[in-house]
Image (tube, grey):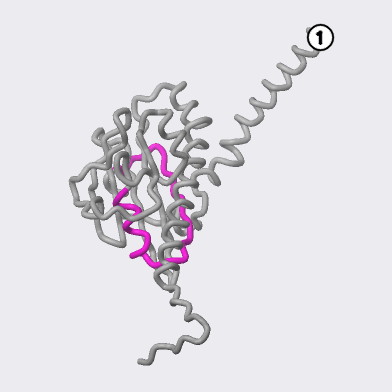
Amino acid sequence: MGMTVRTLAGTGLLGAGLAALAYPLLLRRWCLTWGATEEEAARALPGDDLLPDADLVATRAVGVDAPPSAIWPWLVQMGSGRGGAYTYDWIENLFGLDMHSADEILPQFQDLKVGDALPMGGSGPTMIAEIVEPERVLTFRSGEGDWVWTFVLVPEGDTTRLISRNRISASGATPFDRLVNLLIMEPGSLVMERKMLLGIKSRAERRSHAVERPRRIPAGEPAEKN
């Protein structure tokens, strides 16, 4: 029995060690560029100059079957006490962020301006809107200046590319902190941001298609004439 336990423990440690080695070698680039094309990941975006010497850059993207005008309202109402973050609320709230993702456009939170705060709960960082170009670019920077988060909307015919870029400085981080960031925080950020991007996509597409869908005319009812 003791030998079996030791064998299982050793196997588990070996597996964890192999996974820790595999991530930076095989999976890290995919994790940091999920959904983005090579051109999108390499492209200079608005807000990059707010933190030019970032230690970590993650560019993730999703295609949305809707115009920028259908996506923008979901972006500007993000935040705790507002529209939430469209990701796993229960995980966000474990960290005291008080996020509750909305499924509708909230008119009272649509007038976001440069200098406004993005509320991240009582335990979250202070994020300030630095670039607000409606239906094109939305950039936030942390009060400490060590995190810049940019959303860019790129129309492609009837669809839109929604690109999210995080630039983070880890100056002053200890070697242990860097290891935790590499093996835990980076994969964790993909889980949360992937859910967020897909959440925005589904909300924007649902609303856009509902607006565009023509009213079904009941049988026997004459069609309206122009």
At 40% across and 28% down in the image, what residue appears?
Answer: 95
At 45% across and 89% down in the image, what residue appears?
Answer: 222
Q: Circle 1 sits on which residue?
A: 1
In the drawing, does residue 117 fall left or right of residue 104? Answer: left
In the drawing, does residue 75 fall left or right of residue 23? Answer: left
Type of amino acid under label 1: Met
Q: Quadrant of the N terminus?
A: top right
Along the line of sight, the residue nearer the viewer: 184 or 172: 184
At 52% across and 83% down in the image, what residue appears?
Answer: 219
Q: Above or below — where is 93 with respect to 118?
A: above
Please identify the quarter of the rendering in which residue 153 is found: bottom left
Magenta stretch, residue numbers = 51-77
Q: Residue furthest bottom?
A: 225
Please identify the quarter of the rendering in which residue 84 is found: top left
Could you tell me residue 200's position as x and y percent?
A: 43, 54
Along the line of sight, the residue nearer the viewer: 160 or 77: 77
Q: Above or below — where is 175 with respect to 114?
A: above
Could you tell me residue 25's position as x and y percent?
A: 59, 38
Q: Quadrant of the C terminus?
A: bottom left
What kind of element bears circle 1?
loop
Task: Tell me if residue 177 is in the magenta stretch.
Answer: no
At 50% across and 32% down in the image, what residue appears?
Answer: 182
Could you tell me residue 199's position as x and y percent?
A: 46, 51
Q: Residue furthest front?
A: 220
